[in-house]
């Protein structure tokens, strides 16, 4: 600290030494207490208490006699000889702000690129992203499979482990895609659900119908 009067003292910002209390980024659009929105996007909405210029990055400082002010980085850097400690603190804070700004810019760029990709997909798929289109096709396929297996599922009574598992599989796969053993057991259950006499003509016809329904024979 030099013996000369601190420039901020001359400007009426309080008595030296000054300490950095915090910083903020103040840009438009900004909503006021009365609900009115002012400022264009990115427009500096803060002001420097030292030079009076509009600024975006406001560094909050406090004088030794407790006066709080907001100043711009450029004005702080101009007083390096008079207040090295404050300048050092502001430089560190400015580096952090710049890093955050770069990260925010990169994140926005990635977000815009992603939205551009999604919009291209929507244009290609009638308003749906590729994932949404796939989900829609899969839902339609499942609905078709479920409807196609209803003749069999409707005859599966009980809540045993096998029947429960078969119901789950028949929600996702056509009956013909089950294992040969599973189809065999399901055939016995389906034919038996009609209560035909054992080894009767009706039972044999039902078994034939089951195979036709499963394999399309």
Image: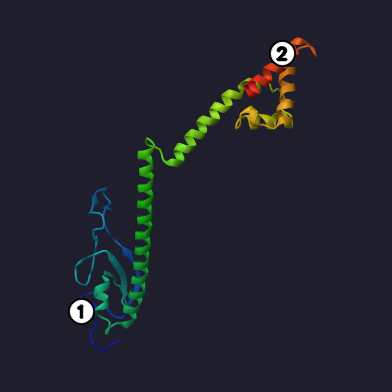
* Mark 1 Cα shell of 10 Å, populated few (<14), some (14-19), many (≥20): few
Near mark 2 (Cα within 10 A), the count class, few <14, some 14-19 or many ≥20, is few
User: Looking at the picture, does residue 135 appear above or below residue 156?
Assistant: below
Quick one: which residue is furthest to the front in this view?
Answer: 217
Give the residue furthest to the bottom: 3
Q: Specify whether residue 154 is in view.
A: no
N-term-proximal mark, 2 vs 1: 1
- Residue 10 is labelled as 1
Q: Is residue 212 above or below residue 123?
A: above
Disc assigned to residue 205: 2
Residue under the image location 69 percent in, 23 percent down = 156
Give the quarter of the image for residue 4.
Answer: bottom left
Task: Quadrant for the N terminus, please.
Answer: bottom left
**Callout 1: SS:** helix
Question: What x and y, as percent, mark residue 142?
Answer: 55, 30
Look at 64% across and 28% down and name the residue there: 176
Q: Quadrant of the C terminus?
A: top right
| Residue at mark 2 to residue at mark 1: CA–CA distance | 107 Å
Residue 155 vs 81, above or below: the answer is: above
x and y, in percent, of residue 75 in the image? 24, 74
Q: How is the image coloured?
A: rainbow
Q: Position of residue 139 (x, y in %)?
A: 51, 32
The residue lying at 64 percent from left, 24 percent from top is 215
Element type at marker 2? helix
Q: Nearer the viewer, mark 2 or mark 1?
A: 2
Whether residue 40 is visible here, answered yes or no, is: yes
Q: Residue at the location (20% across, 76% down)? A: 11
Q: Which label belongs to residue 155?
A: none
Front-lying residue, 12 or 134: 134
Relative placement, left or right, of 137 versus 189 is left
> Depth check: 133 or 47 in front?
133
Q: Quadrant of residue 64?
A: bottom left
């Amino acid at each position: 600290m030099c013996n000369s009067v601190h420039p901020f003292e001359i400007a009426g910002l309080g008595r030296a030494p000054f300490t950095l209390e915090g910083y903020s980024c103040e840009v438009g659009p900004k909503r006021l207490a009365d609900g009115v929105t002012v400022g264009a996007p990115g427009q500096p909405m803060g002001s420097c208490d030292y030079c009076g210029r509009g600024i975006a990055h406001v560094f909050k400082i406090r004088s030794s006699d407790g006066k709080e002010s907001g100043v711009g980085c450029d004005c702080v850097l101009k007083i390096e000889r008079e207040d090295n400690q404050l300048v050092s603190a502001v430089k560190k804070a400015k580096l952090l702000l710049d890093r955050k700004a770069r990260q925010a810019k990169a994140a926005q760029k990635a977000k815009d690129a992603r939205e551009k990709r999604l919009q291209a997909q929507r244009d290609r798929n009638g308003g749906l992203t590729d994932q949404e289109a796939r989900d829609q096709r899969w839902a339609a396929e499942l609905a078709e499979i479920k409807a196609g297996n209803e003749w069999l599922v409707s005859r599966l009574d009980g809540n045993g482990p096998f029947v429960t598992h078969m119901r789950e599989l028949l929600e996702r796969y056509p009956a013909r895609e089950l294992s040969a053993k599973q189809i065999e057991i399901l055939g016995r259950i389906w034919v038996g659900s009609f209560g035909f006499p054992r080894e009767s003509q009706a039972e044999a016809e039902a078994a034939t119908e089951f195979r036709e329904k499963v394999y399309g024979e």
